[in-house]
Image: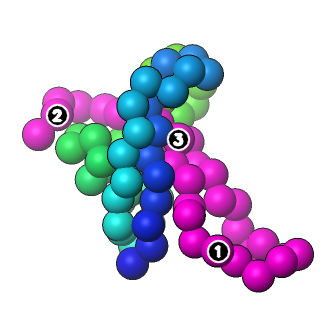
Amino acid sequence: MTIYRVEEMDGEAVVAVHSAAAKTPFEAAEKALGQKVTLRAGADRWVRVVDLTERPRPVRLRPTTFEFKAIGQRK
């Protein structure tokens, strides 16, 4: 499992920070928020997920930051 930092955002301001161990950034966002997420699509209230895994330099084969928005009710 990978450790992710999950940041709840309001515009460009961070309003809360969580840490989550998960297989995917999508799963990390859902674990941290306790609700379903989908792609951000320009939402003002959104979630930034950062992969904290160290990767060899200079090659990074995939992005380390992901953007989602919460949908549905909190669990």
| Bounds of the magenta segment | 47-75
> Image point 65% across, 59% down: which residue?
64
Mark 3 highlights which residue?
A: 48
Horizontally, residue 42 falls left or right of residue 6, namely right
Horizontally, residue 75 falls left or right of residue 56, namely left
Mark 2 highlights which residue?
A: 74
- Whether residue 53 appears in magenta in the rendering, the answer is yes
Horizontally, residue 64 falls left or right of residue 43, namely right
- Mark 3 / mark 2, whichever is N-terminal: 3
Q: Quadrant of residue 73?
A: top left
**For the C terminus, which image quadrant?**
top left
Q: Secondary structure at mark 1?
A: loop
Q: Which SS does the magenta portion mostly show?
A: loop
Mark 1 highlights which residue?
A: 54
Instruction: Give the CA distance from mark 3 to mark 1.
Output: 18 Å
Instruction: Give the CA distance from mark 1 to mark 2.
Output: 31 Å
Q: Are marks 3 and 1 in contact (CB under 8 Å)?
A: no
Q: Nearer the viewer, mark 3 or mark 1?
A: 1
Residue 2, compared with residue 68, is above or below; it is: below
Identify which amino acid the numbered label 1 is placed on: Glu
Picture coordinates of residue 17, whole percent (x, y): 41, 39
Picture coordinates of residue 28, whole percent (x, y): 37, 57
- Mark 1 / mark 2, whichever is N-terminal: 1
> Image point 51% across, 27% down: which residue?
14
Furthest residue to the bottom?
A: 56
Q: Secondary structure at mark 3?
A: strand
